[in-house]
Amino acid sequence: MKIKTIKTRIFKPDENLFHFMEDYISIITEKSILVVTSKIVALSEGRAVEKVDDRTKEKLIASESDFVLPTKYVCLTIKDGVVMANAGIDESNANGKLILLPRDSFKSAEFIRRELCKKFKIKNLGVLITDSRLFPLRAGVVGVALGYAGFKGIRDYRGTSDIFGERLEISRTDVADSLATAAVLCMGEGSERRPLAIISNAPVEYSDRLDRDELKIDIKEDIYKPLFEQIM
């Protein structure tokens, strides 16, 4: 698998995202995955607001979350079935503004995919919209998939055998988040200005059909349920 990052100028709020990408992407080949950072998707949707004070941010976090738990450093939130800090609202590389997450990253990924497939006359193309997350008890962020299109986001090993012939009962690989982590590592978190990347030779199954809930798991089935029960 190969990841090629693309350095760009600074994306402007309310700018046309597709026109921006056209300036930097001259060709995409079959069976590639275009990675787009969620920040420029959100900016293209006008999802940036002025930070007046901390109270403004707190109200935004509450309005963007399904669940909010204030802590010493951040608000732990659940949004769209994902645990994240501050509902994903970001102040880094924001020029004094608060940048919210895209309205619907899956919908945005499918739109980008459809337009690029028409432009480059290809069929098998993945689009992945990324953000960053912290793991509990781990320092440093990793990439996460907010939305994607054109490939299956999970690989299911249940019902197959391991190398010793034992039946696998629960093993699945989170393909989408794994790709996001690899891409974000190369794209950077600081002043790199690499909001786009192209992944080639990725071990994925391309598909026109998408189950946007395939990575979600009911909290009753989550191995962290005992931990969540202490805070909810």
Image: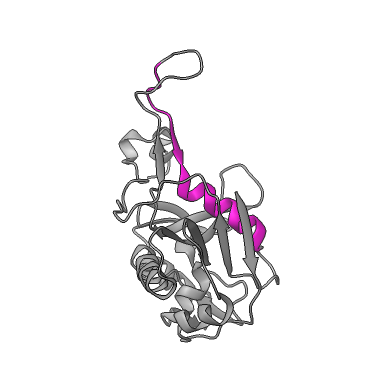
Instruction: Give coordinates of residue 70: x percent, y percent.
Output: 48, 57
Q: Residue furthest right?
A: 191
Instruction: Answer left or right for 44 relative to 2.
Output: left
| Observer-nearest of 8 and 134 | 8
Examine the image and state in which quarter residue 59 appears: bottom left
| Observer-nearest of 64 and 176 | 176
- Is residue 171 in the magenta section? yes
| Observer-nearest of 226 and 33 | 33
- Is residue 166 in the magenta section? no
Instruction: Answer left or right for 202 relative to 127.
Output: right
Q: Which quadrant, please, contains the C terminus?
A: top left
For the image shown, how many numbered marks are present on the structure? 0
Name the residue located 39 percent from the left edge and 17 percent from the top edge.
Answer: 167
Tell me if residue 51 can be seen. no
Name the residue located 51 percent from the left edge and 54 percent from the top edge.
Answer: 144
Name the residue located 51 percent from the left edge and 75 percent from the top edge.
Answer: 40
Tell me if residue 151 can be seen. yes
Examine the image and state in which quarter residue 102 appears: bottom left
Name the residue located 63 percent from the left edge and 44 percent from the top edge.
Answer: 138
Task: Give the colour scheme of this rendering.
Answer: one colour
Instruction: Give coordinates of residue 43: x percent, y percent.
Output: 48, 79
Q: Residue furthest front?
A: 121
Residue 191 lies, with reference to residue 86, above or below; the image says below
Examine the image and state in which quarter residue 123 appears: bottom left
Dominant secondary structure, magenta: helix
Instruction: Give coordinates of residue 73: x percent, y percent.
Output: 58, 58
| Observer-nearest of 5 and 37 | 5
**Residue stretch in magenta:** 167-187
Instruction: Give coordinates of residue 97: x percent, y percent.
Output: 55, 81
